[in-house]
Amino acid sequence: MRTSATGPSVRKLTLLESAYEYIQRRGLSDLSLRPLATEVGSSPRVLLFLFGSKHDLIREVLARARTDERRILNQLRRHDRPEPAGIERAAMELWTWLSEPVRRPLLALWAEAYARSVTASPGPTEGFAKDAVEEWLAALAAAQPADVRASVAGATQRTLILAVLRGALLDLLATDDLDRTTSAVHHHLAVFR
């Protein structure tokens, strides 16, 4: 990563944002530097100078995507709440955020990076899926009372909720059927009332 003593250059940050938008629209599968550079108003040479390699650029784009994802996770972990949000409420907040139509490009990118992370050899998506699971489980844990959070039953509960949210998200991305997937999430979460 090419940075100054004070951090990334304005040009690099601008190109990162543009690349992030482009990759959300186009995905990672056939990513080529030449069309990306043309789209973001640069050249492959400049992108390589600023980011080091295509893999490093993809890593930085995925890190940028994670900052959007972390906003909702951090909201669930806020320390100014008088008590944990409750796992059902936290999961519904997550689902509401995940299911908003404006998030589809980000979540399609997330799903692609997640799948590549578990199926590909080391590369720019390495560790993406594992990190995502750990972050989402931690956000759900923060919504549980301390005694439940520390128990095997609490870990099982978080894992099951995460599996349902992830499955419903993939279904929503595939079908765009918000009513059915939301109904399924509500039905599952009613168990925790």
Image (tube, helix red, strand yellow):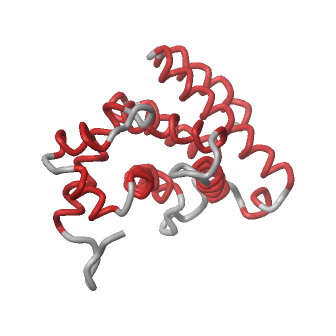
Q: Is residue 25 left or right of residue 46?
A: right
Residue at image coords 44%, 30%: 99
Residue at image coords 45%, 32%: 29
Q: Nearer the viewer, residue 162 or 1?
A: 1
101 to 76, vertically: above or below: above
13 to 171, vertically: above or below: below
Which image quadrant is residue 139 in?
A: bottom right
Q: Is residue 91 left or right of residue 110?
A: right
Q: Nearer the viewer, residue 76 or 7?
A: 7
Q: Is residue 157 visible?
A: yes
Q: Nearer the viewer, residue 61 or 147?
A: 61
Quadrant location of the N terminus?
bottom left
Q: Is residue 132 left or right of residue 153?
A: left
- Rendering coords of residue 138 (x, y %): 64, 57
Q: Is residue 142 left or right of residue 42?
A: right
In the image, farthest residue toward the right? 152
- Rendering coords of residue 191 (x, y %): 73, 31
Residue at image coords 22%, 54%: 15
- Rendering coords of residue 108 (x, y %): 44, 32
Q: Is residue 143 visible?
A: no
